[in-house]
Image (spheres, rainbow, N blue to C red):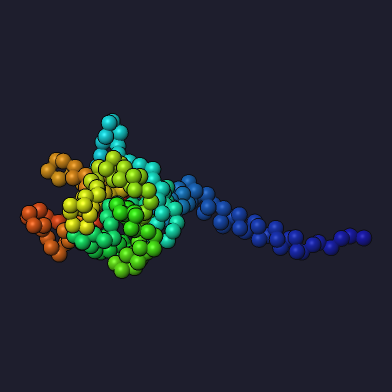
Amino acid sequence: MSKKPNYSYIGIAFIVLIFGIIFVPRIAERISNNDISRQESRSDQKRETPKKSSDLVFIPNNGENRKVPNFAFTNQDGKTITNKDYEGKVYVIEFFFTTCPTICPRMNRNLIEIQNEFEEFEDFGVASFTINPENDTPEVLKAYAEKYGVTNPNWNLMTGDKEAIYKLSNEGFYIYAAANPDVEGGFEHSGNFALIDKNGFIRCRVVDGNPIIYYNGITSESEKTDEDGKLEEISALKEDIKKLLTE
């Protein structure tokens, strides 16, 4: 007794044959013309954020580029913050104290303005170190942060061992800070900001052939110049933060 042909298998075989005749040559042609690889390349380019080196320079010291020293202090929320917490972030460093009656309020108003301009950048932050840790407890720093409008989660106001803070300021950054009972407020310090890149290196722009190293944090953009006629540097700092964020 003869078997009946299996029409389902015949149908499948016919479809496969038609697919091979029509589509295989087209796929082979696309591969030979690199169309597929070009499309994949374009997709990869869309996913990648373009990176480029900026014209901001490193600060040499004893044959090496100056980098943020290791530190560990307590922030306004009572958490221990170290330099490791800033890895992968562009940030600004300042030294201040909450009872400062002179330059600190001006400095921190400028930092608030910078904070607000970069509020959409998760990789931007600020590191503020008090030079009066005996008074500036985490609770005091918390109230100060709320008073000025600190909202950036990467802005840490830090307190801790006084000697360690002064060593970080004077020897780590060469940003002057000292207790002085003869001056208003009992402390004196520089009004400069340091700009740090994502790898922890101090960076700055070059003006008239020389690196400025630090940025004047006292004079605001609206003031244009300080009492000596020197141009403000907050606008330059903003421009340079943008450059480092795209590196």
Q: Residue furthest right?
A: 1
Q: How many tags in the picture?
A: 0
Relative to residue 61, is residue 186 depicted above or below? below
> Which image quadrant for residue 233?
bottom left
Task: Please indicate, yes or no, whether residue 228 appears anywhere in the rendered image.
Answer: yes
Give the camera-side residue of 210 and 23.
210
Give the camera-side residue of 55 and 9.
55
Q: Residue furthest top?
A: 63
Tell me residue 23's x, y (percent).
56, 56
Tell me residue 200's x, y (percent).
35, 45
Relative to residue 193, is residue 121 depicted above or below? below
Give the camera-side residue of 147 and 68.
147
Instruction: Name which residue lies at 24% across and 47% down.
Output: 178
Instruction: Name which residue lies at 46% across and 49% down.
Output: 37
- Residue 147 shown left or right of residue 9 in the figure: left
Tell me residue 80's x, y (percent).
44, 53
Instruction: Name which residue lies at 25% across and 39% down.
Output: 59
Relative to residue 29, is residue 99 depicted above or below? below
Tell me residue 146's x, y (percent).
34, 68
